[in-house]
C-alpha cells in the first residue's frame, strides 16, 4: 500500500499527540489503571470499617473508666494491644482489630486531654 508523502507527518503527529495525551493524562489528569482503582476502593472500604467500629469501641471503654486510666499510662505503641486485651474490639474481625484498636485508643486518649 502506498501512502502519499504528504500524509506521513499527519500520521506521526497523531501518534505523537496520542502518546503525549496518555502521559499527561496519567501524570496530571487523574487517570488510573483498573488495579489502582481497585486498591483505592479497598482502602476506602477499610477506612469506613475503622470509622464505623471506633465509636463502638469507645463506648465499651467508657463502661470501664478504671481501664481508661490504665490506657493513658501505656506508651503510644502499646495502646492498641491494651485495647485488644481489654476486649473492646471483640466484635471486630481479626483482620481489622489492630486498626480499630489504634483508632479507638487515639480517640480515647485525645478526648481525655
Image: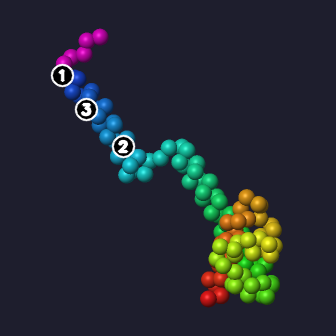
Q: At 23% across and 28% down in the image, what residue appears?
A: 10
Q: Is residue 55 magenta?
A: no
Q: Residue tagged by mark 1?
A: 6
Count all numbered tags in the image, as a single digit.
3
Q: Nearer the viewer, residue 2 or 57?
A: 57
Dominant secondary structure (helix, strand or loop) of the stretch shown in magenta: loop
Q: Nearer the viewer, residue 13 or 82?
A: 82
Label 2 CA crowd tier, 10 Å (few <14, some 14–19, many 20+): few
Q: Quadrant of residue 94?
A: bottom right
Q: Which residues are magenta?
A: 1-5
Specify the farthest residue to the top.
1
Query: Which residue lies under the disc numbered 3?
Result: 13
Name the image quarter holding the C terminus.
bottom right
Q: Residues within 10 Å of mark 1 (few under 14, many from 20)?
A: few
Residue 54 at what x, y percent from top left?
70, 72
Mark 1 lies on a secondary structure that is loop
- Give the mark nearest the N terminus, 3 or 1: 1
Q: In the image, is residue 27 above or below residue 99?
A: above
Please say whether residue 4 is one of the residues in the magenta stretch: yes
To which residue does mark 2 refer? 23
Choose between 85 and 51: the one closer to the eye: 85
Q: Secondary structure at mark 3?
A: helix
- Taking the image as shown, residue 106 lies to the left or right of residue 60, namely left
Nearer to us of marks 3 and 2 is 2
**Residue 67 horizontal/vertical position (percent):** 78, 84
Residue 107 visible in image: yes
Q: Quadrant of residue 20?
A: top left
The residue lying at 38 percent from left, 49 percent from top is 27
Q: Residues within 10 Å of mark 3 (few under 14, many from 20)?
A: few
Does residue 104 show up? Answer: no
Amino acid at each position: 500500500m502506498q501512502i502519499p508523502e504528504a500524509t506521513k507527518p499527519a500520521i506521526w503527529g497523531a501518534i505523537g499527540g496520542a502518546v503525549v495525551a496518555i502521559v499527561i493524562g496519567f501524570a496530571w489528569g487523574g487517570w488510573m489503571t483498573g488495579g489502582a482503582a481497585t486498591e483505592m476502593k479497598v482502602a476506602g472500604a477499610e477506612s469506613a470499617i475503622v470509622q464505623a467500629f471506633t465509636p463502638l469501641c469507645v463506648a465499651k471503654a467508657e463502661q470501664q473508666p478504671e481501664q481508661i486510666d490504665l490506657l493513658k499510662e501505656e506508651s503510644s505503641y502499646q495502646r492498641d494491644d491494651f485495647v485488644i486485651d481489654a476486649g473492646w474490639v471483640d466484635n471486630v474481625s481479626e483482620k481489622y482489630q489492630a486498626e480499630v484498636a489504634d483508632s479507638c485508643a487515639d480517640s480515647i486518649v485525645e478526648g481525655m486531654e
